[in-house]
Amino acid sequence: MTLAAAASPAGAQGTKGSVYAQRYAELCASCHGANGRSDMAGTPVLAGQHSFYAITQLYLFREGRRDNPAMSAVARTMKDEDLRGFSDFIATLPAVPAPPPATPPDAARMARGQSLAQENRCLLCHGADLAGGQQVPRIAQQHEDYLQLTLQGFRTGKRPGYTQAMSEAVGRMSPEDLDTLAYYVARFPGAAAKPTSSPTR
């Protein structure tokens, strides 16, 4: 992936940021939400996500290495500077907590999910708060259905990764355990803090 890495003057960066804020509102917000969190089925939460992770996923969509017709259609129109602009804007969206559940989480299932996260070294890469960092996504309080699809995709090889870490981590897990892990991560407590890393330039 060849992306322009040179930093622009502060004033130019401010102008660029406002341009991509507007473009996000026009192009992305209808699915992903104006604040980066929508309730649309199968649509990931972008609020609190990291720039390096976002730019990598946009690149994979643009190059046809991730399979999602809607995202691929959007990303195919993007130049390298657009990938950078959108990903930097996404990184400014603070994490938004999930709405309170209609019923309290199942304590036994949460405990099992926590054990699975520890046993399979989820915390090693995604952090104790599951907030990720750089190329590792924030997964805390991500939509459960999206987590299920993603984990199953890594297990079957349908979802590409830029390393083998995820495929190795989930390849030995049963579909039932993956669903329990998704249940736990989607309801992960205390996950509303904004990521500490700055957008990459």
Image (tube, rainbow, N blue to C red):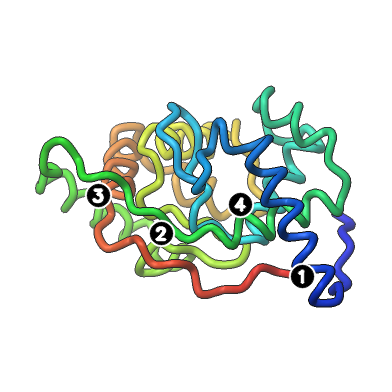
Q: Disc 3 versus disc 4: distance between alpha carbons?
A: 22 Å
Q: Residue at x 79, y 62 (%)?
A: 15
What amino acid is labelled 3 in the image?
Answer: Gly
Which is more foreground, mark 4 or mark 1?
Answer: 1
What amino acid is labelled 1 in the image?
Answer: Arg
Q: Earlier in the sequence, mark 2 or mark 1?
A: 2
Q: Disc 2 versus disc 1: distance between alpha carbons?
A: 28 Å
Give the number of the disc on residue 122: 2
Whether 110 is drawn above or below 124: the answer is above
Q: Disc 3 versus disc 2: distance between alpha carbons?
A: 11 Å
| Horizontal and vertical percent position of residue 102 | 15, 36
Name the element at disc 2: helix
What amino acid is labelled 2 in the image?
Answer: Cys
What amino acid is labelled 4 in the image?
Answer: Gln
Q: Picture quarter containing residue 147?
A: top left
Query: Circle 4 sits on which residue?
Result: 164
Residue positioned most to the top: 69
Name the element at disc 3: helix
Q: Earlier in the sequence, mark 1 or mark 3?
A: 3
Label 2 CA crowd tier, 10 Å (few <14, some 14–19, many 20+): some
| Horizontal and vertical percent position of residue 63 | 81, 37
Query: Circle 1 sits on which residue?
Result: 201
Q: Earlier in the sequence, mark 3 or mark 4?
A: 3
| Horizontal and vertical percent position of residue 171 | 47, 42
Query: Circle 3 sits on which residue?
Result: 113
